[in-house]
Amino acid sequence: MGKLIEPKVLKGFRDFLPDREAARLSLVRKLEEVFRSYGFAPIDTPVLEYAEVLLGKGGGETDKQVYRFTDHGGRDVAMRYDLTVPFARFMAAHLGELALPFKRWHAAKVWRGENTQRGRYREFVQVDFDTVGTDSASADLEILLLMRESFLSLGLGGVKVHYAHRGVFNAFLSRLGLEEKTGEVLRTIDKERKIGPEKTREMLTEVAGAHNAGRILEYARVEGSAALTQAKLGEAAGSDALGVKRLGEILTALEDLGVADTFVLDPSITRGLDYYTGIVFETFLDRLPGIGSVCSGGRYDDLASLYTSQRLPGVGASIGLDRLMAAMEELGEAGQATAGPSVLVLMLEEGLLAEYHRIAFAFRDAGIPAEVYPESRKLAVQFAYAEKRGIPLAVIAGGDERAKGVVNLKDLRSRESFDGLSLEDATARASALLR
Amino acid sequence: MGKLIEPKVLKGFRDFLPDREAARLSLVRKLEEVFRSYGFAPIDTPVLEYAEVLLGKGGGETDKQVYRFTDHGGRDVAMRYDLTVPFARFMAAHLGELALPFKRWHAAKVWRGENTQRGRYREFVQVDFDTVGTDSASADLEILLLMRESFLSLGLGGVKVHYAHRGVFNAFLSRLGLEEKTGEVLRTIDKERKIGPEKTREMLTEVAGAHNAGRILEYARVEGSAALTQAKLGEAAGSDALGVKRLGEILTALEDLGVADTFVLDPSITRGLDYYTGIVFETFLDRLPGIGSVCSGGRYDDLASLYTSQRLPGVGASIGLDRLMAAMEELGEAGQATAGPSVLVLMLEEGLLAEYHRIAFAFRDAGIPAEVYPESRKLAVQFAYAEKRGIPLAVIAGGDERAKGVVNLKDLRSRESFDGLSLEDATARASALLR
């Protein structure tokens, strides 16, 4: 035997133990159900791609964080760092096979060699959903409705989806003669939640002068009602601006559908990226607004211009699953998912092996997860195992019970025992106890 | 605009389009349900690990295929090439937190830079399930039962799980004085299905002489019944050999549980690897035995000896999901999963935006996936979209219908129309049509 190797994981990477992994799977399953109910289809793409495909000819900030190397065949390859770029490549590659508009969701890991001191992980899961191939208000509305239902399905309490329109902000800045400064202004406003209003005003003043800074901050403020905010945007950008009309359609539909409570027309939402051209949004949990947006995105003019000359406008959002899980843990909601079965069949005599597995079958047939303790060890050891795994019920049966065709059922939470039950009565009783 | 980048994927890597990805997800969901019902818990581990952790100090055949590189921090890292090594590392790292015996499943991608000419992929999904921390017959039996139920749940028809015991084969070879040649003999027998009996005899004769080759081939033959095979093994290895007793316990339990039909005691099963020490098994689809084993594994003495001095005996199996999916496609079962919704709400007038989404809500509330076509294009275009996505039902409603509070439902398969239905009647009718 050589020296042992330390079983450590890389910095920024994590194991998921059963309770946490069960919670993560459960989250994704719930989202998947909602996506399916809206006609969004699942896809998957490779983890490794040609570096040129993922990074273009760029040399941006992201590039430095990408895991990139030369493979066995001398190819320059990289691990995906988001799900948007692979989706763009996917659309360009399969345009002929797909019906447009195309609606997809994709839940998968991505990798970035980020600075872990900021509590960031280098391996994390994103859940993206997009509709591409249409510019329509209906697709914008559908994404907003889908975000709302996704979060309702997770049982984390209410959310507020803050939304705005990049085209409207751009039109307003043009009117101020700040067209050239658009990027700087948007990125400054985007940071307001982090840096506070004082610092924001200071920075805007530097970029656009004191007067314009005041007007911009006024523009970005949420008014007493969505209608008032909407009216203000109309004045600021011109009520005939396309974006103003689009916001109006969405606003009316949200009200008609009786879901306007979830949505906040909030002109301070800009999403820093140049990528977005239409509606943009961020989502905050009512019970934990401080953790920041748990689902963000917006409308873009053209998804896949790097790979195809066919214009593919779309709208989409991305859920940061790890931030969401951290929120659930903070809210004490994460313990709900238990990775253990509901029933442990204790092993009293190894000679009754088949009998114990037959009992487990009966519980499973009744929809109750069950397992057999695999060795005839002391009962104290078997009970300790049940406790450590959080298994609530135990079945105890030896030769005597077998001869009589009965089992004893014990509720390990209340320590109540139900002795001499037929297998049928035992499964019925277990169902009742688990309800 | 620069030159377009070709949207190609790396050789040996694949995109999964909606129907296929939906089929893959559906497979994993079904397996997950069965694992859960047996008390197996999900875990996850990082895709990237220290190369030393994944490869030890080895220099084996696998190593050359591993994606290995130096990360930003100068660390020697590698992408996982199976789920067993990361599981061993995981167990060693978390022994204090886990209840033993520990039962886990893990469905995830792994990567090997294999020769793609043999139809192999470089990125593929494995589904592993193991029980560690016990040597017991019950754990062996449970894995066999779980394999049986897993395949039953997939609806691919029957399977035969062929099983044997490595300890018994070893004891038999010792008696023949072939202890030193054990590895060579086992690997030769393991190849018999591929190379045929003639070539096998020839190779065995070379290794062990003509007389022993005959005895080994006789040993490896499946007899007319499991009891006869079992008796032959007892004679060959000594009826007091531990493995013979273990096979007897399993055989009896499978018969007592009424599931013996699924299992074949088949002494030719050896699983080439030195790793296995007890029961070993392979699984063949009744309808497609020729594609080879779709689920293989066995019992091992010690899972994590590279990382911890605590002995962790266990038993486990691995499903090759890609081979299974290829089988489903060959059997014509893959088309079952459709990634599209059941209802398309056509858009006749953009002014009725909220109305169309309200109709979609009503279908979803009735458990029927539904979406709104996002633009008021020609009906022919909207019907063509429904057809391309395989959507069976359409809802057609304009201003007139809205005024009357009704919708028209059309079955796109039969071209039958149901006009002037209330929304409630329309969802009920749709449920009936989809049943």
Image: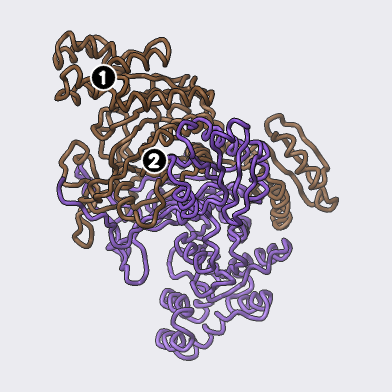
Chain colours: A brown, B purple
Residue at disc 1, secondary structure: helix
Q: Residue at x 54, y 72 (%)?
A: B288
- Specify whether residue A98 is in view: yes
Q: Residues within 10 Å of mark 2 (few under 14, many from 20)?
A: many
The disc numbered 1 marks a residue on which chain? A
Judged left or right of residue A169, residue B84 is right
Q: Position of residue B24 (x, y in %)?
A: 48, 55
Residue at disc 2, secondary structure: strand
Picture disc at residue B334: none
Judging depth in this view, the residue of A95 and A148 nearest the camera is: A95
Label 2 near label 1: C-beta < 8 Å?
Answer: no
Judging depth in this view, the residue of B166 and B62 nearest the camera is: B62
Q: Position of residue A243 (x, y in %)?
A: 32, 26
Q: Which residue is mark 2?
A: A130
Q: Amino acid under label 1?
A: Ile
Q: Residue at x 25, y 33 (%)?
A: A115
Which image quarter: residue B151? bottom right
Q: Is residue A59 above or below residue B380?
A: above
Picture disc at residue A189: 1
The N terminus of chain B, quarter of image: top left
Q: Residue furthest right?
A: A404
Q: Residue furthest front?
A: B400
Q: Is residue B54 above or below residue B94?
A: below
Q: Residue at x 64, y 43 (%)?
A: B419
Q: Is residue B289 above or below residue B382?
A: below
Q: Position of residue B358 (x, y in %)?
A: 55, 32
Which image quarter: residue A388? top right
